[in-house]
Amino acid sequence: MIRVTVWNEYNGTQNFPHYPRGIHEYIKDFLNACEGIEATSQIQFCEGEGLTEEILSHTDVLVYWAHGFHELLSEGAAERVVRHVQQGMGVVFLHSAHMSKPFRRLMGTTCTLKWREAAERERLWLIDRNHPLAQGLPECIVIPHEEMYGERFDIPVPDELVGIGWFQGGEVMRSVCCYRRGLGRVIYLQPGHETYPVYTQPEIQKLIENAVRYAAPVSRAEKVECDWVQKPQEEIK
Amino acid sequence: MIRVTVWNEYNGTQNFPHYPRGIHEYIKDFLNACEGIEATSQIQFCEGEGLTEEILSHTDVLVYWAHGFHELLSEGAAERVVRHVQQGMGVVFLHSAHMSKPFRRLMGTTCTLKWREAAERERLWLIDRNHPLAQGLPECIVIPHEEMYGERFDIPVPDELVGIGWFQGGEVMRSVCCYRRGLGRVIYLQPGHETYPVYTQPEIQKLIENAVRYAAPVSRAEKVECDWVQKPQEEIK
Amino acid sequence: MIRVTVWNEYNGTQNFPHYPRGIHEYIKDFLNACEGIEATSQIQFCEGEGLTEEILSHTDVLVYWAHGFHELLSEGAAERVVRHVQQGMGVVFLHSAHMSKPFRRLMGTTCTLKWREAAERERLWLIDRNHPLAQGLPECIVIPHEEMYGERFDIPVPDELVGIGWFQGGEVMRSVCCYRRGLGRVIYLQPGHETYPVYTQPEIQKLIENAVRYAAPVSRAEKVECDWVQKPQEEIK
Amino acid sequence: MIRVTVWNEYNGTQNFPHYPRGIHEYIKDFLNACEGIEATSQIQFCEGEGLTEEILSHTDVLVYWAHGFHELLSEGAAERVVRHVQQGMGVVFLHSAHMSKPFRRLMGTTCTLKWREAAERERLWLIDRNHPLAQGLPECIVIPHEEMYGERFDIPVPDELVGIGWFQGGEVMRSVCCYRRGLGRVIYLQPGHETYPVYTQPEIQKLIENAVRYAAPVSRAEKVECDWVQKPQEEIK
């Protein structure tokens, strides 16, 4: 059973017509309908910011959505997410989470990109057909209306580039990217602007499900630290 | 002319027999003997920690050595280094700088490794023979005595893996690694324990010179930020 | 059920004391003891060279061992292996198979390396602790006696570098490497010289089992060919 | 001085209005106008196919254009190109050369892709702003009319992905890719359909010039072969 925590900056004032109870609740629900996944949700504006040591210790994969309140997240919460990833927790950053503190710390880059809100069509091409993230999906997912996110997307070269987005207005985007950081996997999925019903598309739900399964930890460390190796394995002459 | 700043945590109490005036002065001197390189030095224990906005703005490549005082570096200084790299400054982290704040922030990992002080022999194999860092160097550099640094070295997969270290006591190490972070290059070079005369070896000096030339910026940004693209390049129907 | 074909150049004159019935039979037997794996064996010196269209079509993962008769393999057989990999068949090349025709064609490089027979100790470090190939294995596998294989190993940069070998005589080797070629996975595992009982070590058997599971195809194509796309998906103005 | 050989399948029957003397002559001429480059041209339909040992030995970078006669190239000529690349010669494959024998042998994949001739607009985004191939170029090159080449482009994961193409009809393409094969660099540049004046655009000329400079060999081997290392560097106990 993969234990997923769907996290949202949600503060109760966000009224997105397609997600009346919040994006976190919507994603949690469709993930709970997937076999072998057990999802709960957390929000930013509560005690512990929904990212306490207790919560993260019991999370296999954190699914992270945020847009407007990145800078209000405490340093401590950002550090906790980073540390748990390094120790093996998986994390899936959705859409505007590219500018979140934990993502930027895991990347070491500014994570900036081009953007435009013009209700334009996106064609998301899955270029690595045999990648676990592409299973059960067509080679091209059409999103009728999406916020444009385009290159230069300032990220490190992905360990695995799985999808490239085409936008009607003329841009391209490395939209589906996978990284390892320590023992944990980091996945970025570009789709998901809040004013369009992107997460209601079955293909996007499948993509998130695939990402959760791929990010699930194989093993998990109590801690990761320097080892002092007193005795050489080989005799030194 | 490549403007290099050689930075050291140096606090005046470090008495390393092979570097009586400090490692920074020693490296600065041999870099200044290289054509097209102009090196100055800075130390941690001074006003601005040797990493002021002014200094970094006039640095093409920062060469960074530190061992014992990583945690005393201010958050602000670490952030400034990271930001300048993202804007195009090159940086070469030497030996124990793998645990420095700027390196760990650029990597997003713990950067821990195995280590042992046993005056053992290292054989540093340059496996990418045509890489700029390997120019003028033999395929194997023998370091008579070196501190062992070994895998698991917790770093992201290098963009370019140039050298692998073999240690007499039985370990291996990804010893020469290159990354891009934003517009800047980040290079890690494992050789250089302070109690052995590693930097007096001509091959190691050549390796550092090559790293400086490779890390030198092609272009440099004033700032890197999100672009809001108001008008689509293509007409959206 | 993963259908494995263990292939050997075996011509009946090879008398390796540790594998009286041939390396292929030995590997076949321990793979057949693994849950979910069904292994058969084939040899080079027979009608169809053990690599007929029929055999490859019913093979999920080909395990390939050869040392002395690479050049006697027909062009046609080499091409068939390459084509089936491109269409999704997995392949695990063992030890001296680095110089086989199919491996060199899949790599596009000479695949040469350094070697020496001196019954020396190898320490195989698995540097990517969370990789599927490292599951159930210690971070360092000690092989008491192995033929030295060392860098420069002339291969393309691996998609995934999982293991680095340390040899007693002073060399290092990228010993465990993974690639994608078309829809298929290609894995190279350096251990396995015929005069030492390398394949009798439980860790090496586990490594081969892991490689077989990882190379098993997710999907398989009937053919891979150029697509002519007559109609644009978007209207062209 | 970089010695470039511009090679074309040219057989005299190709009448491309924008290149009355052949694409090879056109490219040769603009390369000869670049400082430090000395270009000559060769064609397929002549003695030695324009790819003799003599020609390749005196070529630093081969620029290769072909479309309709890939299968008429002899195995010997294809092998010679591959071998010279492995020994250090650079090669730049243009447009439809993705299906040429030498490119496919260097890649180990089918190199197939989607295509469509519909005189559509391409926007070529250079996503690695500091890469040598992007120097002096805008982040987006607009090609008014180009043949569509789109994903799935069946190539190995590029060592460096420099440019992504956007096509008006809805596709994307990894359009600018760099690889190392042995000591040589292999660069693929997608632009250049023969019926549109793509090579007359100054940005595309600059891109090819940049590719030539980047592919130029740092060093060159007489031969690349296995080394038998008789004596261990370290004493084996």
Image (cartoon, coloured by chain):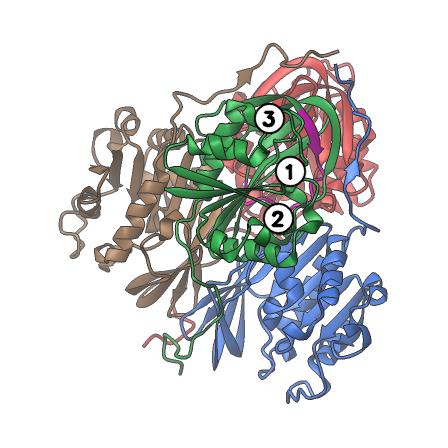
Chain colours: A green, B blue, C brown, D red
Q: Can residue A16 be seen from the camera position used here?
A: yes
Task: Say whether residue D149 is left or right of residue B225.
Answer: left
Main SS class of the magenta portion in the image: loop
Q: Chain of mark 3?
A: A
Q: CA gap, disc 3 to disc 1?
A: 20 Å
Instruction: Give the mark nearest the N terminus, 3 or 2.
Output: 2
Up the image or down, C131 lies above or below C219; here it is below
Total tally of numbered discs in the picture: 3
Checking the image for residue A103, the label placed there is 2
Taking depth in this image into account, of B186 and C97 the one nearest to the observer is B186
Q: Secondary structure at mark 3?
A: helix
Mark 2 falls within which chain? A
The Cα–Cα distance between marks 3 and 2, rounded to whole angstroms, is 21 Å
Q: Amino acid at mark 2?
A: Phe
Q: Which residue is mark 1?
A: A12
| Label 3, residues with CA under 10 Å away: few <14, some 14-19, many ≥20 | some
Question: Which residue: 32% across, 67% down?
Answer: C121
Is C7 in front, or is A70?
Answer: A70
**Looking at the image, residue A180 lies above or below residue D97:** below
Q: Quadrant of residue D164?
A: top right
Q: Where, quadrant-wise, is the C terminus of chain C in this rendering?
A: top right
Q: In which quadrant of the rendered view does residue D91 lie?
A: top right
Structural crowding at the residue carrying mark 2, measured as other residues with C-alpha within 10 Å and reported as few (<14), some (14–19) or many (≥20):
many
Amino acid bearing label 1: Gly
Which one is closest to the eye, mark 3 or mark 1?
1
Q: Mark 3 touching mark 2, by CB under 8 A?
A: no
- The stretch in magenta equals A146-160
Q: Which residue is mark 3?
A: A198
